[in-house]
Image (cartoon, coloured by chain):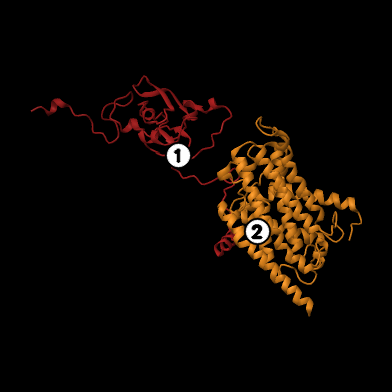
Chain colours: A orange, B red
Amino acid sequence: MTSPYPLLSILGIVLGALTIAASLIYVERRLLALWQDRYGPNRTGPFGLLQVVADSIKIFMKEDWIPPFVDKPVFIVAPAIVFVTVLMSFAVIPVAPGIIVSDLNIGLLFFLGMSSLGVYSVVLAGWSSNNKYALIGGMRAAAQMLSYEVFMGLSLMGVVLLAGSFSLAAIVAAQRKLWFVIPQFPGFVLFLIAGLAETRRIPFDLPEAESELVAGYHSEYSGMKFGMFFVGEYMGITLISAMISVLFFGGWLGPILPGVVWFLIKTFCFISFFILLRAALPRPRFDQLMSWGWKVMLPLALANILLTGAAVLIWSQK
Amino acid sequence: MFSILRTIWYVFLHAFQKRITVQYPDEKPYLAPRYRGRIILSRDPDGGERCVACNLCAVACPVDCIALQATEDEHGRRYPDFFRINFSRCIYCGFCEEACPTYAIQLTPDFEMGEFHRKNLVYEKEDLMIDGPGKYPGYNFWRVAGVQIGGKKKGEGAHEAPPVDVRSLLP
């Protein structure tokens, strides 16, 4: 299933992802305000929609300061990595039938690989900043990624077993009868938590933890380099939400409305849920995070694979 | 685990609650009549200055933002030659109002005093003076005080008995 207009869909997906990520700055502030009985930005333009423009003008105009004590090349490359890896992951996401940049037969593995590479950005940023808080943030990010990456991959194997393919388009097509969230509910919950940890969002924002580590790994960053981390984080949220809707909620599948609209609706629901979690939950302690990952989540993911595998085996025997 | 889900649900329910923000410049908040805001100097019902330049407000002021110079008119009435409040220092504590023996200095429900230049926050007497009696209508210090000034002899004040001829009390 290749796209009829490859360049058009590449452009559409890149621009779409960037636009959604940028507008999430506004959406997040408004939604957080909604859940905290406030208004949020509502002054610039209708409903404050021009806040995005104002914010981006501001961040582009900021001085791009590189502190003298940092490891300069690494310091500059680090924010680009998070951006590139997340944007690369968007290549394998099937937005609608035919609208996909590259329908890899190992799309899911490509996504997992790219999101794992994203951690380099954080660790290198923390290390090159030559700042103790940044370094602690980077180390936490590394430890968090290590422990959560494992069961993130494992939680998706149930989906792969059911669909019989690593291709994301094939996984969506396999959900025509039943969304995988029903047979794979544990996998969905596990992936949701792992995805949260992957995007370094509250409640798993220990790498940046404003209240303890100044701003964690991006303490020393300013201007558009900080903006790259910022937009990269929002793109990460969009990516994980898109992945959840593709893997567990049938991607573009839905009645009446066209596939793209269904995909966007589902993705936006999960983006909102991520923001709701930020409004609701506190940050766990670091050792709690690690022990949860290794002692609870990993065994659950393994049990899920075991049961799903057994079920698929019994099903196919009949 | 259950408490986490319950928290998420309760926070979600806040989406349907009324927002508590007051949209300030469009929607003015209610300020009580006794709100402590911009300081004014009031006049008595006859239109004269109430302030007798006793300096009690300047003494009571914890941040020393009030400066004044007493002087006297041809009738023997004390009044401030200049009266200056530096609102960039003022903490709106209201001690000056409490200290004032003549109800001259009063705090009003107005806080919109933003300025671009700090020196514009120094208010002189003509900026502070208002035309009315403020919170205490009908009160005239010079009428009730037993002080002799021009236009009011001894015993002519309100609630004041005419002076007694001490010689008539002799045995």
Query: Which label number is shown at residue A193?
Result: 2
Q: Residue at x 48, y 25 (%)?
A: B124
Q: Circle 2 sits in a helix, a strand or a loop, which is it? A: helix
Looking at this rendering, what residue extends furthest in the left direction?
A: B171
Residue A51 shows in the view: no
* Amino acid on which disc 1 is placed: Arg
* Amino acid on which disc 2 is placed: Ile
Query: Which label number is shown at residue B36?
Result: 1
Q: Label 1 to label 2, Cα distance in Å?
A: 51 Å
Q: Vertical placement of B56 versus A105: above or below?
A: above
* Residue A20 location (% of width, % of height): 75, 50
Q: Circle 1 sits in a helix, a strand or a loop, which is it? A: loop
Where does the N terminus of chain B fall, quadrant-wise? Answer: bottom right
Given residues A99 and B1, the one toward you in this image is B1
- The subunit letter for the residue under badge 1 reads B
* Residue A176 location (% of width, % of height): 80, 69
* Residue A19 location (% of width, % of height): 77, 48
Q: Vertical placement of A67 versus A43: above or below?
A: above
Is residue A277 left or right of A315 when viewed as pictured? left
Question: Local crowd at mark 1 within 10 Å, few (<14), some, or many (≥20)?
Answer: some
- The subunit letter for the residue under badge 2 reads A
Looking at this rendering, what residue extends furthest in the bottom direction?
A: A318
Given residues B76 and A182, the one toward you in this image is A182
Q: Residue at x 50, y 30 (%)?
A: B88
Count of residue discs: 2
